[in-house]
Amino acid sequence: MSFWLHSSPIQPWLFSTRRLSRRRVSRPAPRVLTLSMHSSFATCSTRQTALIIGATGQVGQHLLRELLASSHFTRVTEAGRRVTPANKLPSAATSKLEQVVIDFENTEGLKQILSKEKQDVVFITLGTKAKLAGSPANFEKIDREYVVNAAKAARSTDPEHRQRIVYCSSGMSNPSSSALYIRSKGLTEKALADLGYSDCIIFNPGMLQNLHRDYSHTLETILSRIASFLSYFTWRLGIDVDALAKSMRIAGEFGTGALPFVAEASEKSWGGATFTTVGNRGAVRLSREPL
Ligand SMILES: NC(=O)c1ccc[n+]([C@@H]2O[C@H](COP(=O)([O-])OP(=O)(O)OC[C@H]3O[C@@H](n4cnc5c(N)ncnc54)[C@H](OP(=O)(O)O)[C@@H]3O)[C@@H](O)[C@H]2O)c1
């Protein structure tokens, strides 16, 4: 396997926004990976531990399976207001799983529980909808405060411990927007980037496809079907939840410095700390890599 060595974890040429036709990318994927020379951050060769918050959700369910199946992660902790029932867990690899029920309202308790284990990679797929939250204030509390508080609680106090965070945000996120949903996502990204993780990777997917919810959400179902149809023509609008989960797992394993160029990762900053973003098309393409 060949690597391109470079001195900075993010090289501008890596993030070219060149349009690549479907025909072009369906050829055998070039095995070009990047490796940060100066980063001591563990990449795919080192075994790591993972924490997932939001594992009972649509993306989270698939991500939990990905993490359990990955030989890269020696230990996986699932934390949430409820945890995945045993009959929904894959029979193999559950020996490395730890499940913890947490109360997101209790920030002290959150800290005690989430900082107990030294987590190398923190994955967050927690989120809600304004309709489910009941009010804009409650939406922001769950969608942003819970996410940021959990990420803060899982942040190691050991300066030698390099940690990565991988968060599932949304396309069009913007902290200055007047629209509640995308503003909350943008503010969450900003807050996560400010937490000082060694590597912060944020996914900005379009409409999620192949959802199997216990409740019906008419608008989401309609938009998801439209995005699913349009996916035949463009990879920018929607992504299957299992594909997104796979891409998040790969990003967690490889990190910014070694992400395959097909991810089309780019560097972003919302006024302060910088972070890495992977858009819908990059996530679709990354999920097709044999990794
Ligand atoms: N729907 C889309 O098309 C779309 C598009 C782009 C981005 N996104 C974003 O992608 C992320 C993942 O989406 P998803 O569809 O996988 O989400 P989801 O199925 O709604 O799952 C959300 C997760 O958050 C947890 N959660 C929700 N409300 C909570 C609360 N009050 N307290 C504690 N935990 C709570 C859920 O736990 P429980 O299982 O206990 O409820 C679940 O684990 C979300 O942030 C979403 O906004 C969605």
Image: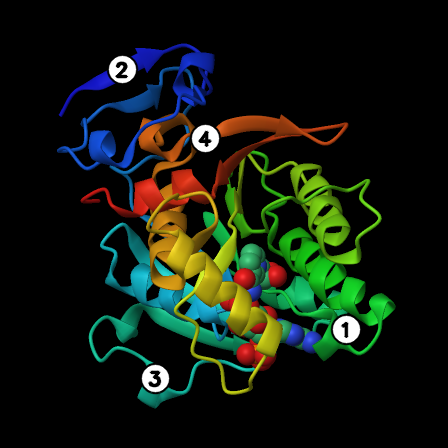
When asked about the image quadrant of residue 128, the answer is bottom right
The residue pinned by badge 2 equals 4
- In the rendered structure, which disc, 3 or 4, sits on the residue that comes first in sequence? 3
Q: Secondary structure at mark 3?
A: helix
Number of the front mark, 2 or 4: 4
The CA distance from mark 3 to mark 2 is: 40 Å
- In the rendered structure, which disc, 1 or 2, sits on the residue that comes first in sequence? 2
Mark sitting on residue 105: 1
Nearer-the-camera pick, 161 or 100: 100
Q: Is residue 34 visible?
A: yes
| Amino acid marked by disc 3 | Lys
When asked about the image quadrant of residue 282, the answer is top left
Q: Position of residue 24 (x, y in %)?
A: 22, 29
| Amino acid marked by disc 4 | Ala
The CA distance from mark 1 to mark 2 is: 45 Å
**218, above or below 34, in the image:** below
Mark sitting on residue 265: 4
Q: Secondary structure at mark 2?
A: strand
The CA distance from mark 4 to mark 1 is: 34 Å
| Amino acid marked by disc 1 | Glu
- In the rendered structure, which disc, 4 or 1, sits on the residue that comes first in sequence? 1
Number of the front mark, 1 or 2: 2
Q: Residues within 10 Å of mark 4 (few under 14, many from 20)?
A: many
Number of the front mark, 3 or 4: 4
The residue pinned by badge 3 equals 88
Q: Secondary structure at mark 4?
A: loop
